[in-house]
C-alpha cells in the first residue's frame, strides 16, 4: 500500500480527483495518510475532512521566519510517515532540506507542458494568462518529480489540451484541469503504487 501525503493550497480539485480515484478504483494500492495546507482557508481542507482524512494547516503566518515554517512543514509531513508526497496545487516552493529528506519521493502537478510556462511566477491562473497572451494553440499539464529547482525535476506524465478561440484564463484553466490534471495526477499515483512508474 502506497501511503501518500497530499499538500494543497486552495480549492483542492486535484486532491478531489485523487480521493475519487481511490474511491472508484482508478487508483489502487494507495492510501492518503494526511493532507497539509499552507492556507487555513483552503477548501481542500474541508474536502479532506469530509473524507475522514487527517487534514492540517501549517501556515507561514504562524512562524517567525521562513526557516521555522519549513521545519514545521517537514515535521508535519514526517508525522504522517508517507511513502511519497504529492504536491496538488501546493504553492510553496520546497526548500532543499525537505526535497533532500524526500529525494525522489515528491511529485508535483503543474498546469502547463513543461518546459513551457513554468518556473518563477508561473502558478495557478497566471500560467493560463501567459499561455493566452503568447497565443500558443496547445497547452496541457505535467506531473514531474520535485528536485531542487522550480518545476524542474524529471517529467513523469504529460497531457496536451487545445486552446480554443474565445478562451479566458478561467475557461482554459478549467479545461486543463478536466482534460489533463484530474487524469494524469491520479494516473501517476496509480502507476507509482503499482510499480509501473519508478521515481528513481
Ligand atoms: C492546479 O491547476 C495546479 O496545477 C496548480 O494550482 C492549481 C490548484 O488547483 N499548481 C501550480 O500552479 C503549481 N505550480 P486545485 O487546488 O483545485 O487542485
Image (spheres, rainbow, N blue to C red):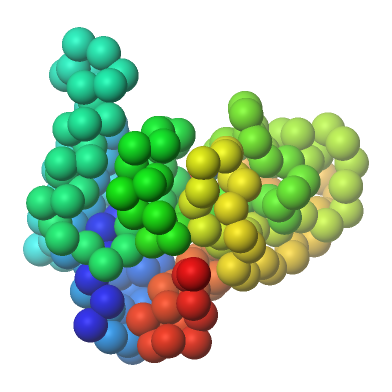
Where residue 55 appears, as percent x and y from the top left, is: 15, 50
Q: Which residue is drawn at 68% across and 68% down?
A: 159
**Picture layout, residue 195 above or below residue 119:** below
Judge from the rendering whether residue 7 lies leftward or rightward of residue 177; answer left or right: left
Residue 4 as seen in the image, left or right of residue 166:
left
**Number of numbered discs:** 0
Residue, x 32% and y 86% (percent of image)?
28
> Looking at this view, is 58 or 22 the one in front?
58
Q: Position of residue 143 (x, y in %)?
A: 56, 61
> Along the horizontal axis of the image, is 172 left or right of 13?
right
Query: Image quadrant for the N terminus?
Result: bottom left
Name which residue lies at 49% across and 87% down. 196
- 106 to 3, vertically: above or below: above
Q: Which of the 4 image quarters holds residue 76?
A: top left
Q: Position of residue 23 (x, y in %)?
A: 27, 80
Kindly tell me whether residue 27 is visible in this rendering: no
Residue in view at x 11 percent, y 51 percent? 79
Question: In the current view of this chain or complex, which residue is farthest to the top?
Answer: 64
Percent coordinates x, y for residue 99 in the rendering:
39, 45
Front in this rendered view, residue 179 or 85: 85
Res 192 seen here: yes
Amino acid at each position: 500500500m502506497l501511503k501518500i501525503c497530499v499538500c494543497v493550497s486552495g480549492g483542492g480539485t486535484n486532491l478531489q480527483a485523487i480521493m475519487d480515484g481511490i474511491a472508484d478504483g482508478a487508483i489502487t494500492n494507495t492510501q492518503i495518510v494526511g493532507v497539509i495546507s499552507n492556507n487555513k482557508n483552503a477548501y481542500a481542507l474541508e474536502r479532506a475532512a469530509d473524507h475522514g482524512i487527517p487534514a492540517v494547516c501549517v501556515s507561514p503566518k504562524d512562524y517567525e521566519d521562513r526557516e521555522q515554517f519549513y521545519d514545521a512543514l517537514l515535521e508535519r509531513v514526517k508525522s504522517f510517515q508517507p511513502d511519497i508526497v504529492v504536491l496538488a496545487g501546493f504553492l510553496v516552493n520546497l526548500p532543499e532540506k525537505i526535497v533532500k529528506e524526500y529525494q525522489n519521493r515528491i511529485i508535483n502537478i503543474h498546469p502547463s507542458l513543461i518546459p513551457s510556462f513554468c518556473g518563477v511566477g508561473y502558478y495557478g491562473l497566471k500560467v493560463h494568462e501567459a499561455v493566452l497572451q503568447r497565443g500558443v494553440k496547445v497547452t496541457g499539464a505535467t506531473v514531474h518529480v520535485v528536485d531542487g529547482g522550480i518545476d524542474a525535476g524529471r517529467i513523469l506524465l504529460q497531457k496536451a489540451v487545445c486552446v480554443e478561440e474565445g478562451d479566458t484564463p478561467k475557461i482554459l484553466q478549467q479545461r486543463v484541469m478536466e482534460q489533463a490534471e484530474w487524469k494524469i495526477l491520479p494516473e501517476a499515483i496509480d502507476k507509482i503504487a503499482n510499480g509501473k512508474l519508478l521515481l528513481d
